[in-house]
Image: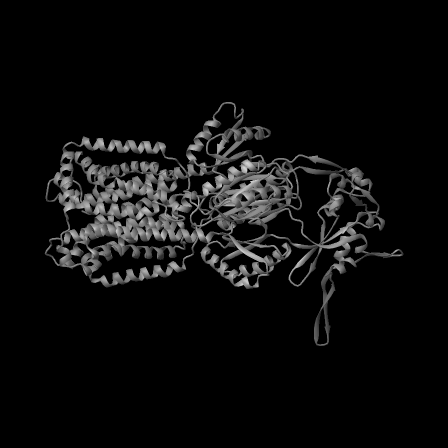
Amino acid sequence: MSVASWISSHRRSILFLMAVLALGGAIAAFQLPTSLFPTVDFPRVVVSLDAGDQPPQQMEMLVTRPVEEAVRRVPGVKNVRSTTARGSAEISVNFDWGLDMASATLQVNAATAQIMSQLPPGTVVQTRRMDPTVFPIIAYSLTSATVSPVKLRDLADYQLRPLLSGVPGVAQVQAIGGALEEYQVEVDPQKLLVRSLTADDVARTLSANNVINVVGRLEDHYKLYLVMSEARLQTIEQIQQTVLSSGVNGVVRVQDVATVKRSTVPEWIRVTADGRSAVLLSIYQQPGSNSVQIANDVKTKLRDFQSQLPAGVSIANWYDQSELVTASASSVRDAILIGIGLAALVLLVFLRNVKITLIAVIVVPAVLATTVVVVWLLNMSFNIMTLGGMAAAVGLIIDDAIVMIEHIVRRLHGSKEAVANNVMNSALEFFRPLLGSSASTLIIFAPLAFLSGVTGAFFKALSVTMATSLFISFLITWLAVPVLASKFLNEKDANADQNGRITLWFHEKYTRIMLRLLKQPVLVLLAVIPLLGAGYIGFQHVGSGFMPSMDEGGFVLDYYTEPGTAVTETDRLVRQLEAIVQQNPNVQTYSRRTGTGLGGGISEPNHGDFFVRLKQGKRQPVDQVMEQIRARTEQEIPGLHTEMAQLMEDLIGDLTAVPQPVEIKIFSADPKALSGIATKVAARIAKINGVVDVKNGINPAGDALQVHIDPLKAAQEGLDPAAVTKTLSDSLSGNVTTQVMTDVKTIGLRVRLPQEMRQTDQDLGLLTVRAPDGHLLPLKRIASIDKLTGQAEINRENLKQMIAVTARISGRDLGSVITDVKKELAQPGLLPQGSYFQLGGLYEQQRIAFQGLMTVFAAAAVLVFLLLLFMYESFRLAGVILFTSLISVSAVFVGLSLTGIDLNISAMMGMTMIIGIVTEVAIFYFSEQQDLMRSTDRISALIEAGKNRMRPIAMTTLAAILTLLPLALALGEGSEMQQPLAIAIISGLLVQLPLVLVVMPVIYSTLKREDIKRPGA
């Protein structure tokens, strides 16, 4: 049985299978998780170390170095980078892409566990694997003018957190801000002295009077009882009445030596929302969960909870990632629908037949729905890359249907054979050209599977989606289109005139032009040279970038005051910044943190961040808004330093350990010289146009008061340094000696000195210390107090000390800025002998990505050439087709330059794809030319093949351009990610028609004539 007969006899099965797959795709679309970006296993593990308040140099020697050396031995480690500050360190362990990060994290844990005994006692080690869930997907603020900060925080902790933690897919709900309640017992040193007591006596006694313990079991006849001993403190009165001592002088109670009050836990952070003190709730998702569904469920829960809110409490949403995800998905959906509509219009204009148009157009939703099934089977998600891949594939999908249906219609015209038989025979005849053309596009994606890094992680999802769509398109075009055509086309359609007056005019003009050019091929060369020249000029002028940027509708604003600035002073300065943010007409809402950050964790009191959410609808672009706020801040608040970035850019930077677009890592044989060099380098690059938010990498801690305990004097008093240190800690920070239990929570009970007795360094010297024999003495008798200037953080990379100067970019492309940075760094005298620099940041990621993509580009060209060689067994013909495809790349550079789009990884993917697309059309041309060679001479065959393929090539070119147009125009949120790819492909398509129909045949005709194997022969 022939293939045509098999298709004809199984036409019902084919159509039913297509319908089932389409229906399955529609169902799977509702089951797929939805997120902003693909699920990516970032190869980074962070080890956080906490060792009290040790100075940075001591911390680096005793803690950071041993841990660095231990994790460096873990298999697969590519790079180790550390930052050591006072009492803490963070070590970033970067692995090769593609490793099993769950296993790698366990190995890092094992490596740190092995050296725990070598670290100072009390050192806390925390290991965490970096993934996108370290940032919230939706967040809310609780504010009130009437409800206390304590009650607001209780509302968040004991009602909202449990409520939202039950939402499927939620990993954790974090609350910060407000205040945590505690009882404070402020002791009077003079009253304690008179009664021969200390603060430690008060703390120990309170703890001993607040117990509940199981002491055993008692069996009484037939019953077994659990025996519990209980003496609990539950009220302020009970705390006040607690007996400290008793004797001949009477009973001494807590109230005799201290003041007991309800207060709040001391905090070194500040949290606000829209100018008011707030509690911030951040909801984090589990890896692989559906962010849109989670956000919707959270909104539903909170909407239902509104009736239970205390009077005067407001809940406001200040961040919602699902809005960007939904808007991006809607934009891509609209781009697909608009593209299909425009492609249908092209078919209708050219073919002037509604039935034929519908047959071609129906292929697109069938292919896309079937693609969704494959995406579901591969455990992928709907995200900006998979949806963008589908949108970009629409033009290529409909291309297959167009060339098939056009070939069928042309073969039907004037044929006396039965329509059904003619259709099947035409489809079988076109199988080999269709297979070759589809293969030429599909093999472009094969090298992309070997891309690593951020490029591979993000664009692999787009590549898989597009390749899947194109393969399914080939199958449906070959199997289903002929079945549909045989079903719906009749003799009237077959006999309809396919060539209108305009088509005949183009054919006549084309014949004249080709006859002249074939006689004078040098004219083609004169036409190609300007295109190549324009491409070179475009290449020289086009900027270069890394990932395409998009307007997320919000941004993160990091701020810093001078090191050692008190949290109250930082708060005062930041309130001025809040006013600037609030006054910007583009801002809808914001949240602010001081002493902590959006990603969680505690930072210095002089550091914090905002998340600024912009208004939806008509407003200025986010880059302009950031520039406005930056300019006003620099002018009006000179003591405040800021950095701004969109959240996804900031998130990807954190996940990949790439903090800024510009990063200059400075190494020196003399570590002490690093700070001076970094200051000079920062001053130089700050003068470069477009370079903003420059940081010299010198991050000193605040000043410190060092209490030096004299061991000899302490010993003479019967004390040791550890005992004195504990007394100091209890006096300054207080001793949370026990927990008072209530119905829903526990409240800490802190014993400490009153605030007025611990304000200055002189107060420290007067603190009372109790010796073991009971006598009391002032601290200054056994210790001296010195002021220490804060030491800078110590940065190391691969066990070498370095310092990193960083900056962001505004209004320029990455490539041109880095060129200027290199010029400044090359100035004589800037780097002393023994010092050198390395460029990191986004530039390093761009360099790695471009190297990978250039390898992909070369591999794609080789694979296309190999395919053509297999098809035609002719080096000359394969070379002509590949050369023609490569010429189209010149148009890509022209298009990018004219539209102001940077050459980034998205544009380079489009540039690579255009080789396969032009090759696909060239194969259609030569398949026709080879058929005509059987009955006519070579020149006539070249011209007739051009005339016969002119209409389908024009239709596919126009259809592809129009389907990509919505993406190229970046209509809607999130479409900026595919804009460079769409512009690159459209630019190549604009020259495709003249290159394939004119330039390629002329170049081919000038070659030595040889027998060329017909495809499949």
What is the x, y in percent for residue 949?
18, 45
Res. 422 in view: yes
Q: Percent x, y for residue 337?
A: 32, 53
Q: Quadrant of residue 6?
A: bottom left
Q: Residue furthest top?
A: 828
In this rendering, is residue 168 above or below 854?
below
Q: Quadrant of the N terminus?
A: bottom left
Which quadrant holds residue 802? top right
In the image, farthest residue toward the right: 248
Residue 52 pos. (x, y %): 66, 44
Using the rendered view, name the quadrant where residue 524 is placed: top left
Instruction: State whether residue 242 is above or below residue 220.
Output: above
Q: Is residue 230 above or below residue 842?
A: below
321 or 924, which is in the foreground? 321
Horizontal relation, residue 391 to residue 142: left or right? left
Q: Is residue 71 left or right of residue 354?
A: right
